[in-house]
Amino acid sequence: MIVVNNEEHGHLIMDECMGTFTPGLDSVISRTVDGQLVGGVVYTAHTGRSCQMHQWGRDKHWINRDLLWVAFHYPFVQLEYDCIVVLVRASHEKTINLNGKFGFKKVAHIKAVYPGDDCVVMQLMKEECKWLNLKPRNTAFRGGY
């Protein structure tokens, strides 16, 4: 099931991303199976034209078609943003590759952002987002957005 704006999920996901979830400012869209959180995305640093996306999944099956659709529909269609930005530790090659599969492109490499690691900045522009063309199988979201 897709769950929207569950604060507990927001805190858990951002803890895994080594960040902070701020209720009232940040948004979270997560997926549960049998009532258990399997993964999700948190949106922070809203500028009016863009936001940062933070993703976490318990295993490689955390994301499905419905979560993919809503994860990109929310910032690009509902909020009418032009782009999404992700910041990734340079040593996290699997995360960089996954974001590449989502359509994000590397736009910068910043030295010494994380303890002992650099940062790769990736961006996805709305007009390049292939996930907006998906037809979700089940859009019965709890919590609405």
Image (cartoon, rainbow, N blue to C red):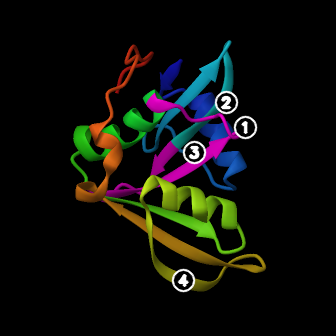
Numbered mark located on residue 58 in the image:
1
- Tell me the distance, in whole angstroms, between the alpha carbons under discs 1 and 4: 27 Å
**Local secondary structure at mark 2:** strand
Which residue in the protein does label 4 denote? 109
Which residue in the protein does label 3 denote? 21
Q: Which amino acid does label 1 sit on?
A: Arg
Task: Name the one closer to the observer, 45 or 66.
Answer: 66
The quarter in which the C terminus is drawn is top left
Does the magenta run of residues contain 61? yes
Mark 2 and 1 residues: CB-CB less than 8 Å, in contact?
yes
**Local secondary structure at mark 4:** strand
Query: Which sits earlier in the primary sequence, circle 2 or circle 1?
Result: 2
Q: Which amino acid does label 3 sit on?
A: Phe
Query: Please, is residue 69 above or below residue 101 in the view?
Result: above
Classify residue 57 by image quadrant: top right
Mark 3 and 1 residues: CB-CB less than 8 Å, in contact?
no
